[in-house]
């Protein structure tokens, strides 16, 4: 069966080769009409040591555009909470999981140009993998994006476009460019191939934990690409009889920018009307006031039996320092999940507990942003 884009809202379909980056009817993001096959556990030991080892579950096979991404370590933080070190990816963030899929797809389609928009990490990943694929690339970023991230984008040879205003203004500028003929829009939000890359995060957990998953997956949520990828993987593993119980999804947002948490707590199926503008937050990577896949994110969290948690700026600062004291230096967005669970994890663990109850992702390296400034020292203050 031919893999097709399909709109989850109105059912509109489009060939992947069309370069259509969104549904032409509702302008919403695509899903992918693709049926994953079961990954045979017994054959994994002899396979390539990257995310491409799960080839049956991926909509692309035999990649050319790869940097050996995937297979990141899982290390304990407490007896019942572990961290998956996705900041050890080739471009130092989990976005490599999806970026390699988009760049490999673009290489096969042969567009005139590739465009992307990002608050930083997705842009650096797309730039790197387009460089690997030999594709011309332009990345749109908000003007306040971390200098280290913009330096990385430029280093990979991508053209950098700084956009005045917030993340939404950046997305609008990129989408306007994406409508130009011959353009492949490597959107980590609108293109579902990205989600089929991020789902390998859960396949790796399943393999490393001997064919099971923890009780809870704690995931940072801005545009929801890791959470929706996780939900895809959980559904596939369950459908193929490869797991028993499904884990709950705990979605984490910064309190300063938390439209999804607000909608979830109100029992809404979509985002609620919000005041213009948004407060600054140290968690720039999840500061998304209007995520296009909001309905899918809310539905996935509810279906899993999970919930939303929010964290303050002071909690983010404290969690970053706490992880650094444990030998793990990650950026302030990447500490959000640990900030959301660390007090309960440390306070409720029994000395004899050996079961893994929760996993948090450490999604981006501290070298990308440095330490969060102290409150009142030029960084966001506690709300």
Image (spheres, helix red, strand yellow):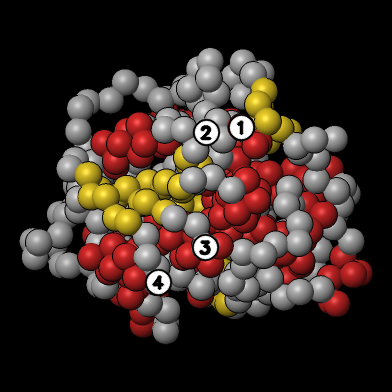
The answer to which of 1 and 238 lies nearer the viewer is 1
Residue drawn at (85%, 57%) of the image: 39
Q: Which residue is mark 2?
A: 21
Percent position of residue 73, x then y:
60, 76
> How many numbered discs, if any?
4
Observer able to see residue 292: yes
Percent position of residue 377, x then y:
8, 65
Label 1: how many Cα within 10 Å (few below 14, some 14–19, many 20+): few
Q: Quadrant of the N terminus?
A: top right
Number of the label disc, if any, that sits on residue 365 = 4
Distance in Å between CA atoms under marks 2 and 1: 9 Å
Label 4: how many Cα within 10 Å (few below 14, some 14–19, many 20+): many
Percent position of residue 259, x then y:
36, 34
Q: Which residue is mark 3?
A: 134
- Left or right of 44 on screen, residue 182: left
Label 3: how many Cα within 10 Å (few below 14, some 14–19, many 20+): few
Residue drawn at (61%, 32%) of the image: 18
Whichever of callouts 3 and 2 sits on the residue coming sooner in the sequence is: 2
């Amino acid at each position: 069966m031919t893999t097709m884009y399909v709109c989850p809202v109105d059912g509109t379909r489009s060939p992947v080769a069309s370069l259509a980056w969104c549904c032409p009817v509702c302008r919403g993001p695509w899903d992918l009409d693709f049926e994953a096959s079961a990954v045979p556990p017994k054959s994994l030991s002899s396979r390539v040591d990257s995310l491409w080892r799960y080839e049956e579950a991926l909509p692309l096979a035999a990649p050319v555009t790869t940097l050996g991404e995937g297979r990141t370590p899982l290390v304990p933080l407490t007896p019942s909470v572990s961290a998956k070190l996705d900041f050890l990816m080739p471009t130092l963030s989990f976005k490599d999981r999806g970026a390699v899929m988009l760049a490999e797809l673009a290489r096969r389609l042969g567009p005139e140009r590739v465009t992307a928009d990002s608050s930083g990490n997705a842009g650096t990943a797309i730039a790197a993998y387009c460089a690997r694929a030999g594709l011309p690339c332009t990345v749109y970023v908000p003007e306040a994006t971390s200098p280290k991230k913009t330096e990385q984008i430029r280093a990979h040879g991508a053209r950098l476009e700084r956009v005045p205003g917030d993340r939404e203004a950046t997305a609008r500028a990129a989408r306007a460019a994406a409508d130009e003929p011959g353009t492949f829009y490597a959107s980590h939000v609108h293109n579902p191939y990205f989600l089929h890359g991020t789902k390998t995060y859960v396949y790796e957990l399943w393999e490393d934990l001997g064919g099971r998953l923890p009780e809870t997956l704690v995931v940072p949520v801005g545009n929801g690409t890791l959470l929706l990828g996780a939900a895809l993987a959980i559904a596939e593993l369950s459908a193929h009889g490869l797991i028993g119980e499904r884990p709950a999804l705990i979605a984490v947002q910064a309190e300063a920018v938390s439209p999804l948490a607000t909608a979830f707590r109100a029992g809404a199926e979509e985002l609620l009307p919000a005041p213009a503008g948004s407060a600054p937050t140290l968690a720039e990577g999840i500061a998304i006031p209007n995520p296009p896949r909001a309905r899918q994110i809310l539905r996935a969290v509810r279906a899993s039996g999970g919930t939303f948690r929010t964290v303050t700026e002071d909690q983010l600062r404290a969690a970053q320092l706490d992880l650094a004291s444990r030998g793990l230096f990650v950026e302030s967005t990447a500490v959000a999940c640990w900030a959301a669970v660390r007090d309960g994890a440390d306070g409720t663990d029994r000395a004899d507990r050996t079961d893994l109850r929760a996993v948090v992702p450490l999604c981006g390296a501290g070298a990308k942003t440095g330490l969060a400034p102290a409150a009142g020292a030029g960084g966001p203050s506690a709300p």
